[in-house]
Amino acid sequence: MSPAFPYSVEFNDLLKLKNKYGAINVEVHVTESSSYVTFNEYRSGMAPLLIINHTSEDIDFHER
């Protein structure tokens, strides 16, 4: 099972799975009369964001 995601608005995210695959990429495209949901396998490097701190300062961030 994956986390719930909207299918009535444009959406693209990497969904974490608790299995040997680890994640799945989902894309939702919406037109006037339909919604298209596409699932793609996870490959290394597909994570939506990578933060690398090259400073001596701490970085605080929050997901929204």
Image: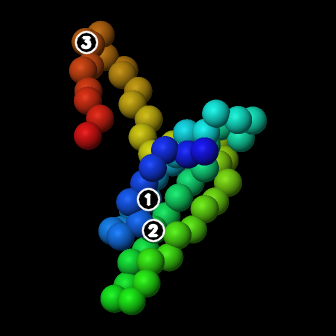
Marks 2/1: CA–CA distance: 6 Å
Secondary structure of the residue carrying tag 2 is strand
Q: How many marks?
A: 3
> Which of the labelled discs sits on residue 12, or is there none?
1
Of the 4 image quadrants, the one containing the C terminus is top left
Secondary structure of the residue carrying tag 3 is loop
Q: Quadrant of residue 45?
A: top right
Q: Quadrant of residue 63?
A: top left
Q: Amino acid at mark 2?
A: Val
Q: Residue at x 61, y 39 (%)?
A: 17
**Tags 3 and 2 touching, CB below 8 Å:** no
Q: Residues within 10 Å of mark 2 (few under 14, many from 20)?
A: some
Mark toward the start of the polypeptide (2 vs 1):
1
x%, y% of residue 28? 45, 68
x%, y% of residue 41? 67, 54
Q: Residues within 10 Å of mark 1 (few under 14, many from 20)?
A: some
Q: Is residue 42 left or right of residue 20?
A: left
Q: Is residue 2 left or right of residue 5?
A: right
Q: Is residue 23 left or right of residue 35?
A: right
State which mark lies toward you, 1 or 3: 1
Q: Amino acid at mark 1?
A: Asn
Is residue 45 something that shows in the picture? no
The residue singled out by tag 3 in the image is 57
Q: Residues within 10 Å of mark 3 (few under 14, many from 20)?
A: few
Marks 1/3: CA–CA distance: 31 Å
Q: Looking at the image, which is closer to me, 54 or 32?
A: 32
Q: Residue furthest right?
A: 20
- Check the image and tell me how it is coloured: rainbow
Q: Is residue 38 above or below residue 21?
A: below
The residue singled out by tag 2 in the image is 28
x%, y% of residue 46? 56, 47
Q: Residue at x 50, y 76 (%)?
A: 36
